């Protein structure tokens, strides 16, 4: 059976028809992505080693969070047993085909305990070092998740200090899948073709189909609805939201819609961005179908090993 036939068979039961899947596949480096995810677990380890962006010096991250071999998931030395277990459960909610992509292309998941400032010392100089629940750094290809946030006070020298750390466990799963959406936007976007048929080396949120869909949704959004106010982080300034109608809004909406496509979107943002959600869901289903059509069954361990999963 040809690669195309195997792929089309894999989309059965997903949100895409075979025709839609084939059309979408034509806008990606389908052969390259299929080959990468279909490599043996040993080869995937080599692919990961080549893709990791070394972070070994400077102020950020803190020494204990710097690059360590193939390490895929880092957890704070300040975690107790319950926190380690909860972090593992949150990580497990990220769909396996998403983990396969992020593993192969050098992604790293970092869990700290005491705010972002614990893993990123430079953030001690800003309030968001203690108040931000998640962060993706494209130039490191890393996701940062603090387990605890804090109220802050500004010091006379301009730095900030934390005032009472607290946990928000109910948001952890959604935030993890949201931030993973940012990583997918970056990584899978590098497999996307430009109109010229060459690798774009951009983001999914720069693609014409997504930009057209979100622009159409924005023309229909009204600021009078209470739930629009509640979701102001994902809304344009002109209706009382917090985002300009540019790159930042496109990326934040994408990440939240990716979490929803992953089954973890508690905000139900698709109610206001139905067209954009349709496009994001098509990317999600496309990646899933590529993996199911020929991806190798590997268990991606925290230390970066890709261990073959024995079929019973």
Image: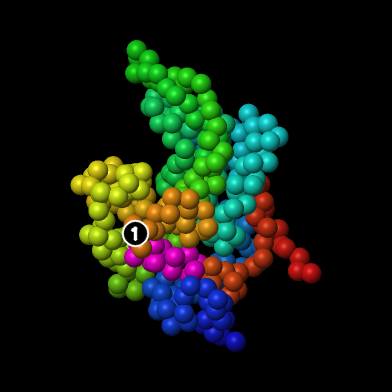
Q: Is residue 236 above or below residue 198?
A: above
Looking at the picture, does residue 149 appear above or below residue 49? above
Q: Nearer the viewer, residue 220 or 184?
A: 220
In this view, the residue in front, 116 or 167, is 167
Most extreme residue toward the bottom, as rendered? 1
Quadrant of the snapshot with the N terminus: bottom right
**Circle 1 residue:** 273
**Whole-percent x and y of residue 162?**
47, 21
Q: Position of residue 276 (x, y in %)?
A: 35, 62
Circle 1 packing at 10 Å, graded few (<14), some (14-19), many (20+), is many
Q: Is residue 284 magenta?
A: yes
- Does the magenta-highlighted stretch encompass residue 159? no
Magenta region: which residues?
A: 275-287
Residue at 34% in and 59% down: 273
Q: Quadrant of residue 10?
A: bottom right
State which quarter of the image contains the C terminus: bottom right
Q: In the rendered view, does 296 fall on the left or right side of 207?
A: right
Residue occupying the point 67% across, 51% down: 301
């Amino acid at each position: 059976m040809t690669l195309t036939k195997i792929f089309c068979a894999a989309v059965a039961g997903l949100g895409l028809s075979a025709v839609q899947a084939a059309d979408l596949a034509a806008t990606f480096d389908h052969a390259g992505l299929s080959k990468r995810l279909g490599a043996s677990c040993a080869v995937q380890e080599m692919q990961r080693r080549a893709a990791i962006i070394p972070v070994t010096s400077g102020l950020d991250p803190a020494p204990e969070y710097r690059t360590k071999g193939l390490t895929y998931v880092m957890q704070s030395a300040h975690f107790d047993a319950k926190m380690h277990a909860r972090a593992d459960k949150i990580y497990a909610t990220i769909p396996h085909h998403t983990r396969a992509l992020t593993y192969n292309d050098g992604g790293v998941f970092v869990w700290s305990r005491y705010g972002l400032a614990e893993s990123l010392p430079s953030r001690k100089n800003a309030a968001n070092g203690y108040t931000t629940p998640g962060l993706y750094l494209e130039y490191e290809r890393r996701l940062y998740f603090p387990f605890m946030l804090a109220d802050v006070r500004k010091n006379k020298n301009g730095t900030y200090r934390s005032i009472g750390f607290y946990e928000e466990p109910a948001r952890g799963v959604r935030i993890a899948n949201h931030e993973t959406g940012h990583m997918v936007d970056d990584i899978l976007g590098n497999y996307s073709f430009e109109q010229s048929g060459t690798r774009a080396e951009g983001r999914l949120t720069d693609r014409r189909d997504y930009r057209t869909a979100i622009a159409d949704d924005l023309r229909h959004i009204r600021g009078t609805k209470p739930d629009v106010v509640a979701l102001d982080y994902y809304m344009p300034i002109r209706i009382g939201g917090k985002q300009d109608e540019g790159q930042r809004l496109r990326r934040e909406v994408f990440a939240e819609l990716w979490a929803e496509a992953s089954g973890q979107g508690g905000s139900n943002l698709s109610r206001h961005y139905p067209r954009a959600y349709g496009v994001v869901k098509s990317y999600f289903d496309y990646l899933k179908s590529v993996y199911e059509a020929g991806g190798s069954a590997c268990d991606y361990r925290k230390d970066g090993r890709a261990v073959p999963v024995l079929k019973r």
